[in-house]
Structure formats: C-alpha cells, structure tokens
C-alpha cells in the first residue's frame, strides 16, 4: 500500500513537472525569481532572472532581423541588457564589421574618382549612423524603456554635442574620396539644420552634397515614405544610388530599392 502511494505521488510530481515545463515562460518566471535594482546614475530598472540574458539577446537579434517591428518600448526586463550592449565593445565591433562589409562592397563598384561622372551616390542616415545618440540615453537613463520624448530629444539634438560613431568618419571620407556624391537623409526636422551641420562638422564630417531634412509637408508622411520619396527624387535626377547606410529599417524600405543596404545595430527604438 505504501509503495503504491509513493508511486502515485511520484507520477503526480512528474506530471506537474511536464505541465510546468510546457507552460514555462520567461516573463512568468520573473514574478518570483527576479531581483530588481535601480541605479541613480542611469535610472534604469534592471530585472534579472533565469536565462534572461538569452531571452533578451534573442529579442535584440530579432529586432535587428526586422522580425520584431513597431515596438513602442524595449521590454522592461531587457532595458538593462540593451543598455549593456549599446555601451559595450561588442556594439563597436558590430558597427566595425558593417563598415568592413561596406568597404569590401566599395571595391566592387565601378565608381572611381578618375572615371566617375558625378552621378554615383551614397546615402547616409544621421542619428545612430553618423552621429551617436547614446550620450542622450545615458543622461536620460531610459535606453528604450520609455517612449522617446521627442521634444526633449530635439532639445538635445539642438545642442549639437552628439559624437561620431566609431570608425564612421573614416568610411564617410573614403566613400567621398572615391568620387561618390554623399547625400544625408534624416528624419530630423528642418529647424535643426544649423545645429545638425555644426554637429556634423565638429564630429569630423564635411564635403557632403546635400543634407535633406523633413519640412512641414514631409511631417505628414511616415518616415519610411519620406525616405523612399527622397530616393525616388535622387534617381529621377539621374543619380545611381549604390548604397544606403542607416540604423533603422525605414532607411531602406519602399521603392526604389537601393543596390545595397547596410544596417547598423540599434535596439533602443523603432521608427516606422
């Protein structure tokens, strides 16, 4: 009788274990096993639990693959992870690998300074492509955990203190020296032109052909449509757009499709 009771209890425990494993979810696990910490320096709430590194890395990678779209904020339990990545040497390595691929691609194009006809073009976005917004997120302590305060963000942009992304100045000038016309296409508003120009020059960029910012009419469009329309305009003028580099998928979406795109990592925010 005792053996039968013991066997019954064992099977019950095993069954519960199977059900628990099947229904297991990392977010549910956070309820009872997480440790919440908050630092005054970053004001970032960090939630850490079993296998959370893997969960947050999977989330970040799927953002970069454009599988996760239109997210308003970074999942709260992954804010600390995004901050750690975006301020790490791994982020800088990932940017450098993208730059290396762009350099290899440049070697395969037919544009050389001696033979260019002036109609070969390259497009750069600005924020988190040429200029880094990481200092803004450091000072505001959100790193995607809150919706971007556009007014506050534009006030920071107007200060013109954004640093260049690692190794991006070198790539910019290599492209320019090969004879490409460089167009800067940004979703920044037109009233930020002077601050943007000064910031770019201070960071080491100069010699671009045109800086295209959003006017009042453009604000009625989605960022994706706005950037696609500018590519269409450039091609209508006869420019051959060899490459587009940006940190958001909206830099590449829509027609006409660029010959080649280079996506830089950015898990902090998503702009459609």
Image (spheres, rainbow, N blue to C red):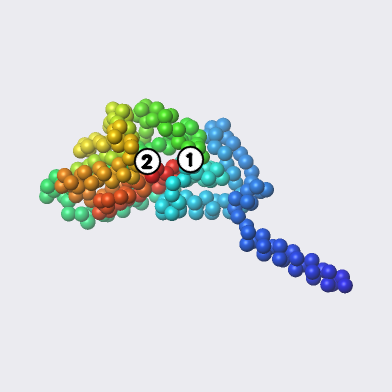
Label 2: how many residues lie within 10 Å, few (<14), some (14-19) or many (20+)?
A: some
For the residues labelled 2 and 1, the Cα–Cα distance comes to 14 Å
**Most foreground residue, 164 or 121:** 121
Helix, strand or loop for disc 2: loop
Residue 270: x %, y % from top left: 42, 44
Label 1: how many residues lie within 10 Å, few (<14), some (14-19) or many (20+)?
A: many
For image coordinates 36% across by 28% down, the residue present is 158
Residue 270, compared with residue 160, is above or below; it is: below
Residue 142, compared with residue 232, is above or below; it is: above
For image coordinates 32% across by 50% down, the residue present is 253
For image coordinates 60% across by 55% down, the residue present is 25
Q: Is residue 179 visible?
A: no
228 with respect to 81 (left or right):
left
Residue 15: x %, y % from top left: 71, 66
Tag in front: 2 or 1: 1
Helix, strand or loop for disc 1: loop
Residue beneath disc 1: 144
**Most foreground residue, 22 or 124:** 22
| Circles 2 and 1 in contact, beta carbons < 8 Å | no
228 with respect to 157 (left or right):
left
For image coordinates 21% across by 44% down, the residue present is 233
Residue beneath disc 2: 128
Sequence-first disc among 2 and 1: 2
Residue 246: x %, y % from top left: 33, 45
């Amino acid at each position: 009788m005792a053996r039968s009771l013991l066997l019954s209890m064992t099977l019950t425990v095993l069954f519960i274990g199977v059900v628990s494993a099947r229904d297991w979810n990392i977010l549910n696990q956070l309820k009872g096993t997480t440790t919440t910490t908050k630092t005054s320096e970053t004001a970032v709430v960090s939630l850490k639990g079993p296998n959370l590194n893997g969960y947050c890395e999977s989330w970040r990678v799927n953002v970069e693959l454009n599988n996760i779209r239109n997210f308003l904020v970074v999942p709260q339990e992954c804010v600390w992870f995004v901050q750690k990545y975006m301020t790490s040497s791994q982020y800088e390595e990932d940017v450098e690998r993208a730059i290396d691929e762009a350099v290899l691609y440049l070697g395969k194009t037919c544009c050389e300074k001696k033979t260019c006809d002036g109609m070969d073009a390259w497009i750069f976005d600005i924020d988190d492509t040429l200029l880094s917004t990481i200092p803004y997120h450091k000072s505001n302590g959100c790193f995607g955990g809150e919706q971007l305060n556009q007014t506050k963000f534009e006030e920071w942009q107007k200060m013109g203190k954004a640093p260049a992304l690692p190794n991006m100045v070198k790539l910019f000038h290599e492209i320019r020296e090969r004879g490409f016309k460089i167009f800067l296409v940004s979703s920044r508003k037109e009233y930020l032109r002077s601050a943007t120009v000064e910031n770019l020059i201070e960071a080491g960029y100069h010699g671009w052909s045109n800086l295209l910012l959003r006017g009042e009419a453009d604000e009625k469009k989605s960022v994706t449509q706005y950037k696609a329309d500018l590519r269409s305009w450039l091609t209508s003028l006869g420019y051959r757009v060899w490459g587009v580099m940006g940190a958001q998928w909206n830099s590449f979406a829509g027609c006409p499709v660029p010959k080649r795109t280079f996506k830089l990592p950015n898990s902090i925010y998503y702009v459609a």
